[in-house]
Amino acid sequence: MSVRLLVLIPAAAAMSLALSAAVDAVALPLFLDTTGTVLATALAGPGAGIATGVLTSAVNTLRNPTFWPFVVVQVIVALYAWLAARAGLFRSLRTAVPAGLGLGVLAAATSTPISYVVFGCTTTGGIALTTALGRALGLPPLGACFFGSFVADFGDKAVTFALVTSVLHALPRRTAARFPWALRAVGAA
Amino acid sequence: MTGGRLHPFTLLAIAGTLPALAWILPAPAGGAVTTAVALVLTLTPGASPGLTGSGSSPGWRPGLVVLRTAVLTAAPFWLFLLLLHDVPSTIAIGLRLTTMIASVVWVGALLPPGRLVEAMVAAGWGVTAAYLFAAALSAVPLLKARAQRIVDAQRCRGLSPRGGVGRRLRALRALALPLVLSVLHEVDERALALETRGFVPGARRTPLAPPRDATAERAGRWLLLVGCAAALAWRLAWRG
Amino acid sequence: MARLTLERVSFWYPAMGRPALRDVSLAAAPGEVIALVGNVGAGASTLLLVAADLAPRVVGGRLEGRVKGEGGRGIVLPTPWTQLSGMAFTVWDEVAFGPANLGWPRERIAGAVDRSLAALDIGALAARDPATLSGGELQRVVIAGIVAMEPALLLLDEPTAELDPEATRLVWRLVRALAGDGCSVVVATSDLDALPELADRIVWMEDGAVRRIGAPALLAEQSLWEAGLATTVADVWRTARLGAPYPLTVAQAERRWRQ
């Protein structure tokens, strides 16, 4: 592993966690905690993405002790982002946003069993309340839990993909050329 | 005996074993025991600010601060569990979650990050794992401060949390993009700085202050692992 | 026996058509202090990266010509906050980062770190978290971290940019002391007034090429003055049309004035 990659991974992980300040300032119900994972994958491949995702979960766990079980979701996000990068889906918002929505469904599907088994669907207050709403609408417990996770993840992952697309396009070409995957991810290679 | 004198790996082993046992052992008794142990552990005085910097604070008996953090973090879960589940399920899940939360809060308060890094280096792991963990940990507060500065600067230029979703998303982009781009721009410079200081991924470096790892502790860690495996085997057999 | 030899070196950054260094030849002897002066974009930083064996090895790009270095090399880059290791939670550990990577035994590391902290006058900061330091303190910690590795060739890129005048004088005194111990130092700096006492040779760079190499008296010459690269005293003397020989420092000006 090159030193540049070794520098990128913790920087991307820390970035995921620091974006919460931006999210709070615009008062949107987003996490953006997979931004670093997606970005690292788009720049340097799935290995970097998975390492970033695991590191994000580890560091996040210190602040939010309940996040560790969701490390699986970070890994899934990295793998999905890898497929999206290979297909050049970060070349425009028109392709990135639907890809992000797709990831939202996948992420919700992955986090639902974890949420259900470990947390009884009380991962966050928002998810708990949305799950209660789902139950009130007559959904079965697991379905209600998926409903809760889905509402949280759907928009979040779409915004994440849109943000990463913006970043990749804003990189000066000289910088982008130094990251093995960046040009391919935006369909320029 | 201060927990801070235990080897970092021992602290991590304990913090990992308690939640594992909380899940393996039959509820609610198993969860109750592990929760009790975890909460008692939070009363161990810490020697220095740990990973979360919430170790000792003047005016408070150190142990109570950690206990309080654990309890306050766990409380909302109990509330939401009551909303969604019946009482027995609430207790069962609640105890497991409380064990997990208390264990993490405890180890976070007790373990200085430098000591964990030294333990990794002394254990003969290459610098890679230690660097990844330490660099991420030290970067978070710096990047958070930078993000806040960008937010403040944009506020001076009229950024506000009001307005439609579209407007707020554009504002989010204006906040997030500079942060992310600045991080990427620095990657090259940081790599150069590491290279010039002899940093080679995967190489071994001299441990500066290796934590003492007594044979008893190492044996204890293995015992915890074996204990968990045994508990799991017993539980599966009991079920089947 | 030169510590550093650059023979007709040209360097292109990745994906750049114009070379950042053009046909540069330079040699640094043990115990010599060489100062690189020039305006922004002159190529001084690039030359230091090439001398440090970071370009093209880490930076990428293309190099023509020959670069030969003897012994360990260390470079201090201009932005201190990007040079923290990220792996140290005290200043002492930060300074010890380099020596520890070199695999030195603990006693040798402790000695080198303590000497380095003393030389940069930051002993009082030893237990502080590097993330809480001011720009000036940080820059001294970074310099200390490289000096602790006891390099045979020390490369400094604007090492006093964040420092107050007293700390700046401290660093220049340290540079002369290290040169006295046999270290070769190549420093790129815009602190021209310090150079008459600091540097053994001045290298004037422009547009990636070396225009002149000579003794510090170069800093009073017409061509450098016109490029804005004269010392303050020489600049004032010339502007006031007070005639050659042009003094470089206040002391020299005083002596000239009394004659």
Image: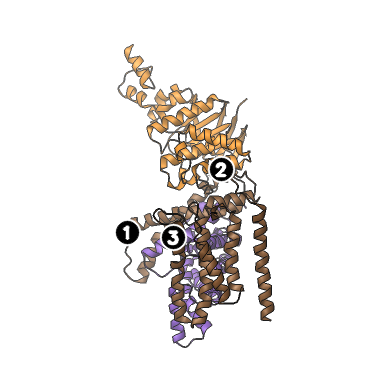
Q: Is residue B152 left or right of residue C31?
A: left
Q: Nearer the viewer, mark 2 or mark 1?
A: 2
* Number of marks: 3
Foreground pick, A38 / C26: A38
Q: Position of residue A189 (x, y in %)?
A: 57, 60
Q: Is residue A145 left or right of residue B222?
A: left
Q: Which chain is orange?
A: C
Q: Position of residue B2 (x, y in %)?
A: 53, 54
Q: Which chain is purple?
A: A
Q: Nearer the viewer, mark 3 or mark 1?
A: 3
Q: Position of residue C222 (x, y in %)?
A: 39, 24
Using the numbered discs, state the Cα–Cα distance from disc 3 to disc 2 in whole angstroms: 33 Å
Question: Color used for chain B?
Answer: brown
Looking at numbered disc 3 in the image, what kind of residue is underneath it? Answer: Val
Q: Which mark is residue B155?
A: 1
Instruction: Pick whichever of labels 3 and 1 is earlier in the sequence.
Output: 3
Q: Which mark is residue C97?
A: 2
User: Which image quarter is the N terminus of chain B in?
Assistant: bottom right
The kind of secondary structure element at disc 2 is helix
Residue A13, placed above or below residue B227: above
